[in-house]
């Protein structure tokens, strides 16, 4: 039974967003862009003058994430979208709370 829980020796684990076996280049790009913008927005909130970057990156990441979630094709893409959306929302909310979109 342990062979069911772990991949066999000849199968390597490869993370992929195309879990259905078909390529989705546009959807994958949108999911990765959402995650990137969300992480930038979240990390920018830790810097004193980062509220401008956090606000803009969070707003763009949130908009991109909503559209990406709408057109996503696989569960892996949706999971990446949700992580990016949450990070973008927290980033934009803290960015606005600490000064907003303008310096």
Image (cartoon, rainbow, N blue to C red):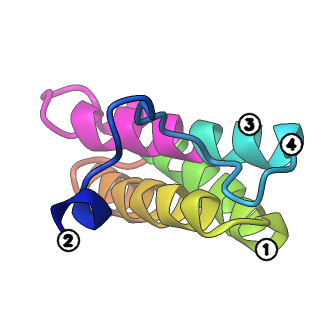
Q: CA distance from mark 3 to mark 1?
A: 14 Å
Whichever of labels 3 and 1 marks the residue nearer the N terminus, that label is 3
Whichever of labels 3 and 4 marks the residue nearer the N terminus, that label is 4
- Secondary structure category for the residue under label 1: helix
Residue, far front: 1
Q: On screen, 47 above or below 60? A: above
Left or right of 78: which side holds 4?
A: left
The residue positioned 26% from the left and 58% from the top of the image is: 3
Disc nearest the viewer among 4 and 1: 4
The residue positioned 41% from the left and 36% from the top of the image is: 13
- Secondary structure category for the residue under label 4: loop
Label 3 packing within 10 angstroms: few (<14), some (14-19), many (20+) = few
Q: CA distance from mark 3 to mark 2?
A: 38 Å
Disc nearest the viewer among 2 and 1: 2
Badge 4 is on which residue? 23
The residue positioned 40% from the left and 59% from the top of the image is: 83
Is residue 101 among the parts visible in the rendering? no
Is residue 78 among the parts visible in the rendering? yes
Label 1 packing within 10 angstroms: few (<14), some (14-19), many (20+) = few
Residue 86 at x, y percent in the picture: 38, 65
Q: Which residues are magenta?
A: 34-54
Whichever of labels 4 and 2 marks the residue nearer the N terminus, that label is 2
Q: CA distance from mark 2 to mark 1?
A: 39 Å
Marks 3/1 in contact by CB < 8 Å: the verdict is: no
The residue positioned 45% from the left and 34% from the top of the image is: 11
Badge 2 is on which residue? 1
Badge 1 is on which residue? 70
Whichever of labels 3 and 2 marks the residue nearer the N terminus, that label is 2
Q: Out of 30 and 12, give the one closest to the viewer.
A: 12
Q: CA distance from mark 3 to mark 4?
A: 11 Å
Q: On screen, 55 above or below 49? A: below
């Amino acid at each position: 039974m342990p062979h069911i829980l772990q991949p066999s020796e000849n199968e390597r684990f490869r993370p992929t967003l195309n879990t259905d076996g078909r390529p989705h280049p546009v959807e994958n790009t949108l999911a990765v862009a959402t995650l990137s913008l969300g992480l930038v927005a979240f990390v920018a909130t830790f810097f004193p003058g980062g509220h401008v970057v956090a606000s803009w990156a969070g707003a763009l990441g949130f908009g991109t994430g909503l559209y990406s979630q709408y057109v996503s094709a696989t569960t892996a893409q949706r999971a990446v979208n949700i992580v990016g959306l949450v990070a973008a929302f927290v980033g934009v909310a803290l960015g606005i709370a600490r000064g907003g979109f303008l310096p």
